Image (cartoon, grey):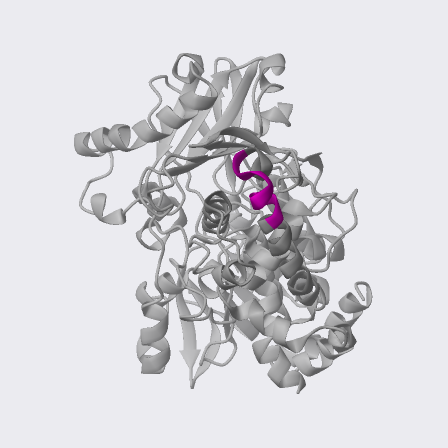
């Protein structure tokens, strides 16, 4: 019974974890007309020490890639007492969550390359056990300073609105657009979500592992399911659209909004987004006390906290250390070979890959002839979302002017076109609204992007830095500028620095397959794999093996991969769970 539950129901709990974290972005290439110096926004933690220091000949666990998934796995495993080495090709850890800075005459501008929406990180508020990143930060006793806020902007064909937890209440946005009928439908939808949210909250992500040990670690939480309707629980694996239809929601504005919300969170509309993800997220957005978090210093503050946790517990991070090969012998992952070294670094317990499933299968890092054909073909053909366009801007803006803005805006041009179509949807993040540390006085930073709608095919035969590339960047960023002008009409005149990111930028800086935004696995048609592979001691984590494109989902995947490395971690995991029960 326990194993059946773990294989079918418990994994769905983790699917909710992609929620408020925004999607992955790239470090864009420069298109500024003024000479600037670009620097990695690395804290003092990221010196050249581990670039020069040679790794040991053996560790318990080796991790390839320092995205949030890899960092989360390393943080937990180090806390459990394992010896851990993490290898990162880039000059800074964090994957899509790393930051960079621009030094200009006005001062330093700090930009995030990726996530911008966060929730549940603020240590001044109670933790939810369904939030894996917060769980990891609490376990390693590291805090991320956050500024709480409650609203963001909506720019829709119907007009401009301010989104809050009262979105569906009388006087809220739905009431303004659709009247009493819309309010009533929204109420019924939220009522139908309540038992699903309870099912999601019944099992902490930290209890899940992908081996028989789950019978022990999940068992202590099974009483939480006693009062829940098993038939309701089964809905968690269905497309969210089935829940919308089951609640008889047919108001056009509501269904359009839910498609946009699902698309922003998972890369697919409501007919492809798994219900478990939305069961958590509807509460994160619409609970009476719902808040969002602005990490002071940007997303890289989260990376810094995870790195601190890894290093203080004895783990090591090696930057500019590209892994050429995962060594497999007799069906078992034995270790890795790092570029410019013939020596094999031994993995006593296991190897965790935080690179995408496409790159794991196609880059040559694994001898795929050693993999079963079925596994190789299925993983290689994992559907991928399109890429995106991205624009970072440093601009003149007083504190008084910033106070008139929202920190985020969601823009939709035309409801008659799908949210998946090009140049129809855009997301804006202006973290300077809350955080003064990111730009010089009387200046601010923002980034705007088109989520999962930019076709890679347009770019794949264009050479970077060629005249054709520069022209195409200018053409494809026009839509982003036009959307920005709806929020800040004179943004071009205010701009003192801007950079455009393209699918090729994403591919280059993050080694991202075709610059993809993430996996496009539709609920009801296919399912995401958990960390296991047919190779003994080889596990995976990250967005391409776990639902959701944002930070909580990949943190959850890293947590589960860490728990699954060895059965001898059960004792440490139970200690962790004892603090959550």
How would you classify the magenta stretch by its main secondary structure?
A: helix
Q: How many marks?
A: 0
Q: Percent x, y for residue 183?
A: 61, 44
Q: Residue at x 18, y 45 (%)?
A: 461
Q: Residue at x 23, y 43 (%)?
A: 459
Can you say whether 507 is above or below 383 in the image? Answer: above
The residue that appears at 57% across and 33% down in the rendered structure is 176
Q: Which span is picked out in magenta?
A: 177-184
- In the rendered image of this protein, does residue 265 appear above or below residue 301? below
Determine which quarter of the picture holds residue 17. bottom right
What's the residue at 46%, 32% (across, down)? Answer: 158
Q: Quadrant of the N terminus?
A: bottom right
Asked whether residue 58 is in view, the answer is: no
In the rendered image, residue 451, in percent from the top left (x then y), is placed at 41, 44
Q: Which residue is more in the foreground, 106 or 258? A: 258
Residue 545 in the magenta stretch? The answer is: no
Q: Relative to residue 90, is residue 211 drawn left or right?
A: right
- Residue 172 position (above or below residue 102): below
Give the side of residue 290 with respect to residue 331, left or right: right
């Amino acid at each position: 019974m326990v194993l059946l539950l773990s294989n079918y129901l418990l994994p769905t709990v983790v699917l909710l974890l992609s929620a408020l974290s925004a999607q992955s972005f790239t470090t864009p290439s420069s298109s500024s007309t003024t000479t600037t110096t670009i620097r990695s926004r690395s804290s003092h933690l990221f010196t050249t020490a581990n670039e020069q220091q040679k790794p040991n000949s053996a560790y318990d666990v080796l991790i390839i890639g320092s995205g949030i998934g890899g960092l989360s796995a390393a943080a937990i495993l180090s806390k459990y007492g394992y010896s851990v080495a993490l290898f990162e090709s880039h000059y800074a850890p964090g994957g899509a969550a790393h930051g960079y800075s621009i030094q200009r005459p006005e001062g330093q501008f700090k930009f995030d390359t990726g996530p911008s929406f966060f929730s549940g990180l603020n240590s001044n508020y109670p933790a939810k056990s369904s939030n894996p990143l917060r769980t990891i930060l609490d376990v390693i006793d590291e805090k991320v300073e956050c500024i709480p806020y409650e609203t963001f902007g909506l720019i829709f064909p119907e007009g401009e609105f301010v989104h809050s937890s009262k979105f569906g209440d009388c006087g809220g946005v739905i009431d303004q657009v659709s009247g009493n009928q819309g309010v009533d439908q929204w109420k019924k939808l939220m009522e139908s979500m309540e038992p699903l949210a309870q099912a999601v909250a019944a099992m902490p992500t930290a209890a899940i592992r992908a081996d028989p040990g789950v019978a022990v670690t999940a068992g202590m939480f099974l009483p939480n399911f006693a009062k829940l309707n098993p038939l309701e629980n089964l809905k968690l694996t269905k497309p969210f659209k089935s829940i919308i239809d089951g609640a008889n929601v047919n108001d056009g504005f509501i269904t359009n909004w839910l498609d946009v919300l699902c698309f922003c969170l998972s890369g697919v509309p409501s007919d492809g987004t798994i219900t478990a993800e939305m069961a958590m997220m509807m509460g994160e957005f619409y609970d009476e006390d719902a808040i969002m978090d602005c990490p002071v210093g940007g997303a890289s503050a989260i990376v810094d906290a995870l790195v601190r946790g890894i290093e203080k517990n004895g783990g090591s991070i090696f930057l500019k250390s590209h892994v050429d090969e995962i060594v497999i012998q007799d069906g078992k992952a034995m270790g890795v070979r790092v570029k410019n070294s013939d020596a094999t670094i031994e993995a006593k317990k296991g190897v965790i890959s935080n690179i995408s499933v496409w790159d794991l299968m196609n880059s040559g890092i694994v001898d795929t002839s050693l993999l079963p054909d079925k596994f190789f073909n299925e993983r290689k053909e994992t559907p991928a979302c399109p890429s995106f366009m991205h624009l970072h801007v440093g601009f003149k803006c007083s504190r008084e002017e910033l106070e008139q803005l929202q920190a985020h805006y969601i823009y939709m041009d035309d409801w008659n076109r799908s949210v998946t179509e090009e140049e129809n949807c855009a997301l804006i993040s202006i973290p300077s609204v809350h955080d003064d540390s990111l730009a010089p006085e009387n200046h601010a930073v923002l980034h705007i992007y088109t989520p999962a709608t930019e076709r890679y095919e347009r770019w794949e035969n264009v050479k970077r830095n060629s005249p054709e590339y520069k022209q195409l960047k200018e053409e494809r960023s026009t839509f982003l500028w036009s959307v920005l002008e709806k929020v800040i009409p004179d943004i071009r005149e205010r701009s003192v620095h801007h950079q455009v990111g393209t699918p090729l930028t994403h591919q280059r800086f993050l080694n991202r397959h075709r610059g993809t935004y993430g996996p496009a696995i539709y609920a009801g048609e296919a399912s995401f794999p958990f960390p296991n592979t047919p190779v003994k001691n080889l596990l995976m984590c990250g967005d391409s093996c776990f639902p959701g494109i944002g930070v909580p989902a990949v943190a959850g995947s890293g947590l589960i991969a860490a728990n699954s490395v060895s059965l001898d971690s059960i004792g440490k995991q139970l200690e962790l769970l004892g603090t959550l029960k």
